[in-house]
Image (tube, rainbow, N blue to C red):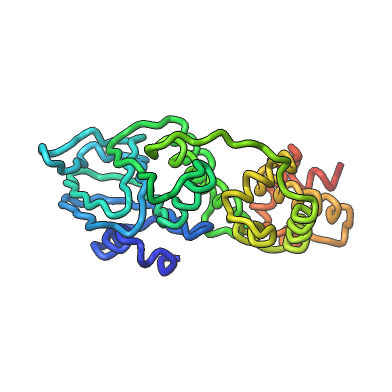
Amino acid sequence: MVSGLRGFTIFDHLHGEGVPLRAATTFGERISAALWGRHDHTETCYLAPSHHTLSLYLEGGEGIRRRGPRGLIGGGGSGRFCLMPAGLSTDWEVTSSVLMLHLYIPTSALDRAVTEMLGADPGAVDLQDRTFFVDPGLEDLIRGALLPLDWDQPGDRLAASQAAQTVLARLVAAYTDREPRALVARGGLSPHVLRRTVERIEAGLDGPLGLDDLAGAAGLSTFHFARMFKRSTGQTPQGYVLHRRVERARTLLADPALGLAEIAAACGFCGQSHFTARFRAVTGLTPGQYRRS
């Protein structure tokens, strides 16, 4: 997965310095995440990154300071965010351990979100430069909807992509220099686009389904598709797909000749334990308990 993050300036810098990488993945629109565990004392300079970066300190980081025109800026620690726009060089002094999440956002992904959310020319809207700020809602979103997922498991791919898109939407809404325009619900996806999307879901329930896959079937951007799909169905794409997987599993559990591992594979779960956890989250029962009932 490391190869998929090559080309992100800050990722390449940290990886080249040998900073331990705990996990990494790439979501839709090449929005990517990296989990770093840093334990060295050093100075780091990010020179004009080609992408935007959101950083969240998950543990530690109290000894990290940013070098500004008036000296060092402190205030790091667990729960603190830093937002670094593309093209802005930053200097950092690292004197304590930290576990931090980086979300790398291509300029094309932010530009698209600005166009769709703000109805504005992306060239006229800037992402803010913020250091050591607190956003409880954004932190809850990342800790609750993104970090618990297994990024290596195909079954969690859609949920992770949706969470990343939600983070992007919050950045555009709260951390750009323009207020979002009112978004008018117009009925969601057209009937034939919704039907085509549902057909794509049903045909792909036995394998990984990404937000890009479904948006492509609808002929929409991932961001626009996710909002329109929820208007049409009342569910997020990942919620809808999970319920369809569980419904298929319920049907297959009626056949005693099928083993649980076989059913898990046929419904797109990456293993029996993953199948059990997701099935119980929806139904309140394990697959075995459901079969016996």
Q: Foreground: 274 or 176?
A: 176
The answer to whether residue 30 of the structure is visible from this angle is yes
Q: Residue at x 19, y 42 (%)?
A: 66
Residue 118 percent location from the top left of the image: 49, 41
Q: Quadrant of residue 4?
A: bottom left
Q: Where the N terminus falls, by quadrant? A: bottom left
Q: Residue at x 47, y 54 (%)?
A: 109
Residue 33 percent location from the top left of the image: 43, 54
Residue 115 percent location from the top left of the image: 50, 48
Q: In this image, 41 relative to 61: left or right? A: left
Q: How many callouts does the rendering have?
A: 0
Q: Foreground: 51 or 147?
A: 51
Q: Quadrant of residue 281?
A: top right
Q: Where the C terminus falls, by quadrant? A: top right
Judge whether 244 appears above or below 285 on screen: below
Q: Foreground: 178 or 11?
A: 178
Residue 85 percent location from the top left of the image: 32, 48
Q: Residue at x 15, y 52 (%)?
A: 43
Judge whether 262 appears above or below 74 on screen: below
The answer to whether residue 261 of the structure is visible from this angle is no
Q: In this image, 109 relative to 161: left or right? A: left
Q: Foreground: 14 or 175?
A: 175
